Structure formats: structure tokens, C-alpha cells
Amino acid sequence: MGEIKHFSKVDFSDPRSIQQIVSAAKADPGFWLMVKEREMERRTLAINTLTTVTSEVGSIAAERLTPSIAVLAEELVSRMFGTCSTATLANTQEALLQAAGAELRDVQLQNPGDSSSSDVDDR
């Protein structure tokens, strides 16, 4: 299992720092699974806003997963660096979701007949 390490100095304006955070998240399988679940939640919510048909799946999706991606990102960054700005947390959240989305797309491309994959494009 991966270990998230604490770093005392970091330049959050450097994209490599955000990539370092994403790499740390991927190194922790349980944490990374939660991030991918949040990306799937985002996709589900996007589908629900595009469709007007109310279904049992739609009503379940309205109940948001906890902890939220904001809480997950804050926990990860604080474990690694201590406190940081709101802008850094927002960038981290987006980077985590984009990385999870890319990984999910790769899985979907490898398993094109799998109906559990989402057909919604990422933002």
C-alpha cells in the first residue's frame, strides 16, 4: 500500500507540485478509489442534468457521496503540506478528478463492451 508523505516546502504554482499530489493519491489504493468514486458521481450528476427522466438511479445519485472531493483533497494536501490556499485546494480537486477521469476512460477503452462504463464526456 502506498504511503502519503509530508513535504515541508512546496511551490503550489508549479504544476509538478499538483502532479506530486495526484501521484500520492494514486499510491494510496483506498484513497484513490474514493477519488474515482467522486469522478463517477460527477459523471452521474452530469447525465442526470442532461436527462429529464426521473429514475430510481437518479434519485439515488442525488444523495452525494461522503466525504466530498473537497474534503478528500483537503485531507490529502494537509497530510502532505499542512495548510494551503483555497485556490490550491480547488486546483488539487480538479487535478484529482481529471486524473481519475483519464484512468476511467482508459479502462472504458480497454473494455468497450462493458455497460458499467459511462458514456458522458469529461469536462
Image (cartoon, rainbow, N blue to C red):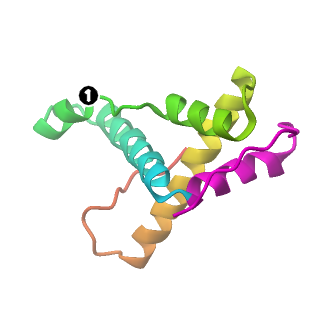
Q: Nearer the viewer, residue 118 or 85?
A: 85
Which residue is outermost to the left?
Answer: 56
Number of numbered tags placed on the structure image: 1
In this rendering, position of residue 37 left or right of residue 89: left
Q: In the image, is residue 36 above or below residue 117?
A: above
- Image point 35% across, 35% down: which residue? 45
Q: Nearer the viewer, residue 40 or 123?
A: 40
Q: Find residue 37 and report its horizontal and vertical position in percent.
A: 39, 47
Q: In the image, is residue 7 above or below residue 87?
A: below
Q: Find residue 21 and report its horizontal and vertical position in percent.
A: 69, 48
The type of residue carrying mark 1 is: Glu
Residue 37 magenta-highlighted: no
Q: Nearer the viewer, residue 36 or 54?
A: 36
- Image point 11% across, 37% down: which residue? 56
Region in magenta: 1-27
> Which residue is under mark 1?
63
Q: Find residue 6 and report its horizontal and vertical position in percent.
A: 73, 44
- Image point 79% across, 44% down: which residue? 7
- Placement of the C terminus among the 4 image quadrants: top right
Q: Nearer the viewer, residue 84 or 109?
A: 84
Q: Find residue 91 and report its horizontal and vertical position in percent.
A: 69, 35
In this rendering, position of residue 78 left or right of residue 38: right
- Image point 60% across, 39% down: which residue? 76
Q: Crowdedness of circle 1 by 10 Å Cα count: few (<14), some, many (20+)?
A: few
